[in-house]
Amino acid sequence: MAPDSKSEDKRVDILLVEPNPGDTRLFTESFKDAKLKNELYTVSDGDDALDMITQRGAYAETPQPDLILLEPKLPGKNGMDVLSELNNESALEGIPVVVLTSSDMGEDIVKSHELDADQYLQKPVEPEDFIRFVQEIEDLWFAIVQETPAEN
């Protein structure tokens, strides 16, 4: 099913929570080439992620993200702690979270699902695969938008 024109025209504010500067650069470049209108915000640790999502401190004027791409292994507060806190805030429950990792550890997958992550995706190893990976994230975004009831 093709996404409706409203979801294609809306700018999507995406928060990438990624501690690896190389992966952050690859995601940034891949999202620049994306078909989805997006604004990509990046932070490298769980504390900054929560501040941005809840619009606290230095992030008070930053828009709340429409989609969160979350690496579980973060300095400080880890990604699973961030996901747990999001689940405890009813105002934040509706933000889709995609857990991204280079690991295929079963415990990460199980924990992500227990904490109601919308999706768990393994990051590509090769830089040239990031563009295709971002396209998969875009397709996932369109699917999530279509499943969400329209707000009145």
Image: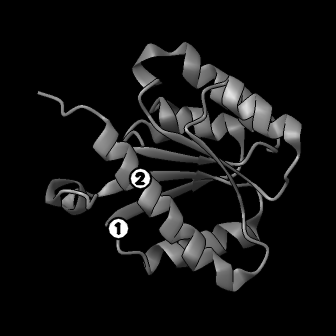
Please rate how many residues cluster around mark 1, counting C-alpha atoms within 10 Å: few if below 14, some from 14 to 19, many from 20.
many
**Side of 63 relative to 43 (left or right):** left
- Name the disc covering residue 36, or none: 1
**Side of 52 relative to 73 (left or right):** left
Q: Which of the image's four quarters has the N terminus?
A: bottom left
Disc 2 and disc 1: Cα gap in Å?
A: 9 Å
Residue at horizontal 45%, vertical 77%? 32
- Name the disc covering residue 147, or none: none
**Side of 35 relative to 89 (left or right):** left
Give the mark, 2 or 1, whose residue is nearer the N terminus: 1
Q: In this rendering, does residue 68 appear at all?
A: yes
Residue occupying the far front of the picture: 1
Q: Position of residue 134 (x, y in %)?
A: 53, 68
Do residues under tags 2 and 1 come within 8 Å of each other at their CB atoms? yes
| Image position of 57 with respect to 21: above or below | above
Q: Which of the image's four quarters has the C terminus?
A: top left
Q: Mark 2: which amino acid?
A: Trp
Q: Which residue is mark 2?
A: 141
Q: Position of residue 57 (x, y in %)?
A: 51, 33
Please rate how many residues cluster around mark 2, counting C-alpha atoms within 10 Å: few if below 14, some from 14 to 19, many from 20.
many
Q: Position of residue 4 (x, y in %)?
A: 18, 56
Residue at horizontal 46%, vertical 24%? 93
Residue at horizontal 85%, vertical 54%? 103
Q: Mark 1: which amino acid?
A: Leu
- Is 60 in front, or is 43? 43
